[in-house]
Amino acid sequence: MAAANGAGRILAGGTDLLVQMRAGVVAPGAIVDVKRIAEMTTIVEELGGFRIGAAVSAAVIGEHERLAQAWPGVVEAVNLIGSKQVQGRASAGGNLCNASPAADSGPALVAAGAMLTIQGPKGRRDLPVEKLHAGPGRTTLEPGELIVSIVLPPRPARSGDAYLRLIPRTEMDIAVVGCGVSLAFEGDVCTSARVGLGAVAPTVLLVGDAASALIGSRLEPDAIARAAAACRAACRPIDDKRGTIAYRTKIAGVLLARATAIAAQRARSH
């Protein structure tokens, strides 16, 4: 990488990098394939949670039964990356590093409270997923740094998560809005919540006000309405061919309500 004078690129799955190279968008001075680094290509149960190598393919993540049972919303999101063929190569780490505001993995991992283990010239550090992105196509990684793994925390009893997105077609499309929700309960009362939104701002959003509206409630209609309003207030979308600002803003609240219902159902049956 040093020989590339800062123009080197990491190859995990290559589903973004190779397309960008063929389009002439990037011309790496060197390409480093990380698919043979065990730490980056395995899923390990650790301290009650999971450590997912940044280069583990979406297909492998989708086939991991214990991970799917513990974090179904995260697995749902990762399994929306591209087609079945693409999922054999594409990784959650690469999806995050591509830094698309509409990437599916981001909102679900933010809702899950996932942490990133990052390796670089200065050593290792941990970073919450919501602090990775600096804007479309840009991350906060320093020169020479790469994501080694994604860490999902232990799943408490009576907790659940879900991810939903709206797309113009039935499959293989880019999210107009994506919403991840993770909840925990004591009895019927929501004691913990996290909400992630994608495709409504330059970066994926952690919507603290939406979570605050849910915590302490029994998910009554008023609490859901306040959480949905908080999601709409957090939106800073753009107008494009896939959706207008007004449409995206409205849909953010709709998906919050629907994803919350699914996460709550999973939590109560967990």
Image (cartoon, grey):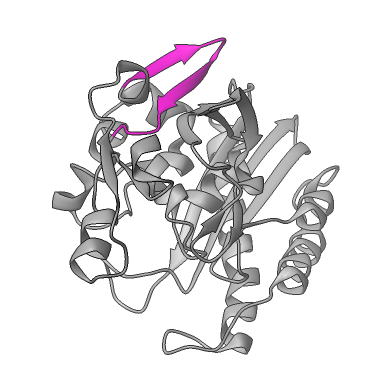
* Count of numbered labels shown in the rendering: 0
Residue 1 can be seen, yes or no: no
The answer to which quarter of the image holds residue 8 is: top left
Toward the viewer: 13 or 231? Answer: 13
Tell me: 104 left or right of 154: left
The residue shown at (23%, 23%) is 36
User: Residue 175, how many percent across, how many down?
Assistant: 43, 69
The answer to which quarter of the image holds residue 161 is: top right
User: Residue 150, how many percent across, how many down?
Assistant: 49, 31
41 versus 79 height, above or below: above
Please provide the residue range marked out in magenta. Answer: 42-56
Point out the residue furthest to the left here. 85
111 versus 69 height, above or below: below
Tell me: 94 left or right of 251: left
Q: Is residue 45 magenta?
A: yes
The residue shown at (58%, 83%) is 238
The residue shown at (32%, 42%) is 91
Q: Is residue 220 magenta?
A: no
Tell me: 60 left or right of 157: left
User: Residue 55, how many percent across, how many down?
Assistant: 33, 33
Residue 230 can be seen, yes or no: yes
Q: Quadrant of the N terminus?
A: top left
The residue shown at (24%, 53%) is 15
Q: Quadrant of the C terminus?
A: top right
User: Residue 158, how many percent across, how many down?
Assistant: 63, 27
Toward the viewer: 114 or 70? Answer: 114
Point out the residue furthest to the top here. 47
Dominant secondary structure of the residues highlighted in magenta in the image: strand
